[in-house]
Amino acid sequence: MKWKSIFKKQAVLLLIVSTAMIYTSVYAGNGSILTNPNNVNSLADGVTGKVTDAYGIALAGVTVTVKGTSMKAVSGSDGTYSIALATKNARLVFSMVGFYTTEKQASLGVLNISMTEDVKKLDEVIVIGYGTQKKGDLTGAVATVSSEKLNQGINQSTAHALQGQAAGVTVIQNSGEPGAGVEIRIRGAGSINDNSPLYVVDGMIGGIGSLNPADIESLTVLKDAASAAIYGARGANGVVIVTTKKGKRNQKASVSYNSSLGNQSVWKMPSSLDAAQRNMIHKEALTNDAVPTTETIWKYYNDPANGATKTDWFKEVFQSALIANHNVSVQGGGEKSNYLFSLGYMDNNGIVLGTNYKRYNVRFNSQQEIMDNLTFGENFSIVQSNTKSAEIRGGYDGVLSAALFNMRNTPVWVDQANKIYGTPTGDFPNPVASLNARDNRGIGNEVNGNIYLEYKLHNLITFKTDLGYNSFNGKNTGFQAVAIGGGRGLENKNSYSESRSNSSTWIWNNTATIDKRIGNHHVSGLAGMSAESSLWEGLNGGTAFDFSNESPALRYYNNAGSFPGHVSGGADDNTLQSYFGRVGYEYADKYLLAANFRADGSSKFGPDNRWGYFPSVSGGWRISKEKFFDALSNFASDFKLRASWGQLGNDKIPNYQYYTTVSGVGSPTLDGNAFTAVAQNRLSNPDIKWEVTTQTDIGIDASFLNDRFTLTADYFNKLTTDILVQVPLVASLGVGSAPYRNAGDVSNKGFDLGLTYRNRKHEFKYSVTANIASVTNKLNSFGIAGSSDIFSANYKNTDVGRIAEGEPLGHFFVYNALGIFQTQAEVDAYTKSGSKIQPDAVAGDVKFEDRNGDGVISASDRFNAGNSFPTLTGSLSLNGEYKGFDINMLLVGSQGNKIFNGLKLGGVFMQGSSYNNSPEILDRWTTTNHSNTVPRVTINDPNNNKRYSTLYLEDGSYARLKYLTIGYTFDKKVVSEKISKLRVYLTMQNLITITKYTGYDPEVGAEGSFSNNLYGLDKGTYPIAKAFIFGVNFNF
Amino acid sequence: MKQIISIFMVLFVLASCNKDFLNKQPHEFTDAVFWQTADQAESALAGAYTPLQSEEALGGEEWSAISTFSDDSYLQDDGYPDFIAMSQFRATQNNEGDFSHNSYTEYYQTIKRATDVLNYTPSIKMDDAQKKRILGEANFLKTWGYYELARRYGGLPIYDSKNPAAALVRKTEAETWAVIEKSIKEATTQLAWEHQEGRPGLGAAWGLLAKVYAYEKKWAEAKTAAETVINSGKHTLTSSYEDIFTIDHEHDSEILFGLGARLDEYPITPVLMLPNNVWGGTHPEPMGEGWRLVSPTNAFYAAYQDGDLRKSATVAKRGVDIITYNGSTDVLVAPNNKSEVVCVKYNSPYKERYVGWAAGLNVPALRYADVLLIETEAIMNLNGGGPGKTVGVSAAAVHFNKVRQRAGLPAIAAPTFADLMYERRMELAFEGGDRHFDLVRWGLASSIYNSLPAEGSYKPARTYVDATHKLLPYPQKQIENSNGTIKQNPGYLGPH
């Protein structure tokens, strides 16, 4: 296996490099180990002492200043300091990041001091929309995630890294495939449309798909209307604000290198029937179906050669795969400037043969104070991503379906030397042939940047103008080589298709902010405007065939033998213009008030409905600052009550929906040739406008037990009205897609809860954080007379999900299976007005509920059989430090969601005789095994046991140890003072998964369009990998 | 400092001034700029052809699978239980989301697009002959859509761009056939005998009108319409039956209307019928490619009269018949086929080499032979020889025998209705389900279907009840999407 040698090489290299680094550093720093760099004057005219924390642990690096002078000292690694005093009575100020600054009267001699850790970080400044705010002053529901937290587990993308880190933020992983996207939902699904949040990176609206998590300084999630209202028409699904790392002023150039290398494998190896088991089951089915033994199908099973198992398809399809990550950054700053430069590289090989994702990140930013109070700055990033994907899901092409349904008496190869594959009996291809022959690639090149100019006037008003630009070039290619014997779609001829797209967006933000404190009054304000324009252009080259040479270098249209296809292309653009403002007022840090307003004009809507107006107000009361609270202050050190209300919009629909258009609809063959064809294939609606979400939030922020225990809790009530929805039309209108209409309303109610407990036992420092959230969702009404439901997703052309009045979005709509008829008498007794409800059933068939009582089982008997969205999501993270060791782990989970296990169709419910089944079918009903969940085996299936029923639904609850990282940071004494940090670590991803779900993976995500709001339709999901990753952090 | 502030002020003003900033036009035709030129009318007309060549409609999966309603065939693919239940007359609703739903949708897209062409083209300035042809083709395509759907489902919603509500209510069967008759009659005044491959000419219009009259039992009119084609002298039978279904002959004058196909593009009729594992491993062949959607029953194979040349051109029996496929010529093996018989009617493009899903063979949608037999049927009906009668009608013999003799069978001086039934069945087998629709319109479906014994597990004994099964259950999604204003057919689960 090739990866093994690569893995070994890289691992050895890594080991040598890191050992060499440690070794040289120790030597280089040898001289300084025993010397104290902070040694000052003699003790006679000064003070000495030791600084410790509340637990008596020595604190190194504490700055000691003589108040009113510039005299300074820094405590050494044993916590001791010594400083000269100008006068005999002076006050010493002890300060260090993360601790309360302490002042003490000092006199000559010894002064030992213990400092109190500032754990609640109320003065922490966090990034909010178009500005920053102190955490203690927040009046909205805002969650922040630090760089540290985002990078503890080693993640492919920023969105992956957010999983489990903030209460009320659900990360839905669609696939374990390298490079696959992840969707984020904040506080449920407010719309029948796209429910993804708005992403803002360094002030620019954009995506976070290709953002390197290592480049992130902090991430803020704006959950309620008051926080997100400043983003108006696009904030209804919440806002994720990302701030990338920056250099700091007055800091020497420092280099940080972070490298990791690991091995990934499938967390659970699926299985299927072996050839002998398959023979037994299929023969039983033929017997049950009374297929005469003279029919040829019996010959297959009676041939002993077909009873021999030759292949375990899953073991052929899954591989153990290498994952490598390298990040280097250089940062620093002078008196008037700062800079940061970083490089990132990721190489993620998938656990399914041949899948791969590579990403190269370059990022640069700097700030220059070019005149007094006038600052110029910029952020730039360049990303290239390369994805090689496989056909994972899909009716006949999915390799994970093929691995399950292909017979195991078929060999992988008939003749490997001559590349002749073992041919499957049915329509699924040989999955190994499919993976080898299909080469689907995507390349994306992205350039992001913004430049800004900021001017501070008398420390009162700040003006800022900020121009951002994003450019994306993408190319997708698919080559399918000929695979002899590989099965359907692979044997005949090779083919190639290519599509390209480019898009660009510019945004221009101009803001003025004011901040003034007069006594106990603190007033702040923001006024701004923004203009934004995007253009997308795409070209689809069609499919070409018959390449006489399949070499990868020759995969261009020029080398094709025939080109019957039809080239298509088009463009799409939109603009947005906005005005916004914010006013804040605080009195004595006790009473907090804020109001936001935004007006957005969008080209997506017609001139009369173009402008939307989005207000919000919020308030906070820090009860703990009141006199009457003093009695409680020993117990609760901080207690704040918050409330907010606001309105936000959602405009995530395609452009031009208020125009009727005539567009390309393929190319019929007329007079033997392709003929350009057009049609009006979509109906328009000139009256569409924003959908509006009104959200109320009540929350508390509190700290107890000397700040050891902190709590943030929110209750919210979201009501989305005028939802933009495509109500399905009757086909007799002759158009492919329905017009968008503003109709109906959806409510989401729920709570988010974040709890943290921090403590320290001697040298063992630890914290435990739990995030829990729950949302109840309901479509209150469609608002369209007569309309009651929409079928939202289907599997193999049969509806699975439904959106209906009075029911939650995203529920499964199937028949209710009451069990298995154990005897013919039970079938005969299941009657309505004397006639049998299931006349075609026999003992062993599924008993379906006749819910509407009309005496037959029909489509009207389907019902809301459970929700695909969890009732409760949660995470638990543990962080501990002991001497040089650190341990970090994150457990995530969901509860109460259902998954539709699509692979049961074929796996448990037989689909023809050409396909294998899953081992679950061995528990089928027979006259001796009275199963009540798996019916008798039958191919003819006269009772239609295989119709979608509750037998397909499984509990999708799970708990997963996302990561467990154990690290060790070498003591500077051992290494070198020149090396500011050397840490080695081992990260184990997805080590433990607890679930009852029987499919490939409980993190199913959504199939295809996320706007159908159905998250648990499992068509054979690419499972998430289990990984062991070794890494080094190295700063100097 | 003042300068700096004024710069920021100017920026604020600059950023908000352009009035047209929010006006964005789509980068494709809007209604306002379309329907201006002849070329636009031509491409809009082409848009009406597109849905027909989709996966399910004309020459597609539903078109192939509809023949399983008859006594000729069964659905080889088990993956469509709802369709199988309908074809076995067991269904109480039509929840079949693929064949039925998609072909219904495709035919209506053709209807809507053709109707748009009929609405907008008259006001476009262009050559009169071209305009007449465009309108004639549009009328023909619109008729074709309604005709296929009316045979299946009875009364239909009639598309009206000015009245969207019309799409929500089904007209009666008689009203629907009146719309069909009117639009195809219009086409006969607009089309010319000469036509391009893939487009209908006057022969197709008169031929389809003859069939429409036959469904309406207007026998005198049917005879006249059919004889208009016959007497035009523009159409003849291809000399060999087998040749009709080859790329070389797909545009013979026998083909009144053939849906155009080119290599690697839909329609894909040949692969739908192609068996899988033809040689059972004894000769090289690409596996998994034949969709073997539909296969003939053993009984159908046995029903051919001795010497009928259409037999070897249509069916092949395992262990008996020799077929040529992918460069090999040998006795058929096809071990996976449930019956012993496969359909070989459309295999010609695959004889030398398997060329891919879309073999580029036109779909024979309407043939001259069909029109000859409609004329025969009209004459029989006008002379007391209709369905159920045993009397021979010598007046009907001339064109009847042309079809029969091409098939290598001896002429019959005074053919009976049973003779006609045999000819229609064997002549048109696997060409879009006429056998079933014929038996239904003749009122003979129950007597024939219900007396047929079960054949294996794939073609069980069936119970056809005329009052219910003369029409398919209406596609359930349409009933649901209309919120019940579209009603169900009698005998199936409501709403009625």
Image: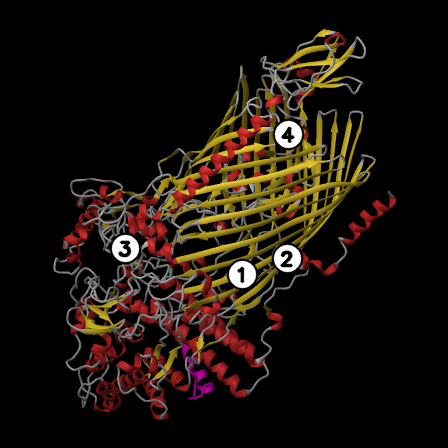
Q: Of helix, strand and loop, which one carries label 1?
A: strand
Whether residue B326 is situated above or below residue B10 in the rendered picture:
below
Image quarter of residue B231: bottom left
Which marked residue is nearer to the observer: mark 2 or mark 1? 1
Q: Are marks 1 and 3 on the same chain?
A: yes
Residue A493 place in picture, x, y as percent: 36, 66
Amino acid type, label 1: Arg
Instruction: Return the residue found at the far right.
Output: B2
Which marked residue is nearer to the observer: mark 2 or mark 4? 2
Q: Of helix, strand and loop, which one carries label 3?
A: strand
Residue A134 place in picture, x, y as percent: 68, 30
Q: Name the residue under label 2.
A: A574
Q: Name the residue under label 1.
A: A500
Disc 3 to disc 4, C-alpha distance:
66 Å
In front of the other: B348 or B256: B348
Per the rendering, the mark at residue A413 is 3
Boundaries of the magenta span = B179-196
Q: Earlier in the sequence, mark 3 or mark 4?
A: 3
Whether residue A1007 is situated above or below residue B136 in the rendered picture:
above
Q: Main secondary structure of the magenta part?
A: helix
Amino acid type, label 3: Trp
Q: Mark 4 points at which residue?
A: A642
Amino acid type, label 2: Asn
Binning the other alpha carbons within 10 Å of mark 4 as few (below 14), some (14 to 19) or many (20 upward) gives: many
Residue B319 place in picture, x, y as percent: 15, 69
Q: Are marks 3 and 2 on the same chain?
A: yes
Q: Of helix, strand and loop, which one carries label 4?
A: strand
Residue found 45% across the figure and 71% down from its top: A563
On what subunit does the disc labeled 1 rest?
Answer: A
Q: Which of marks 3 and 2 is nearer the N terminus?
A: 3
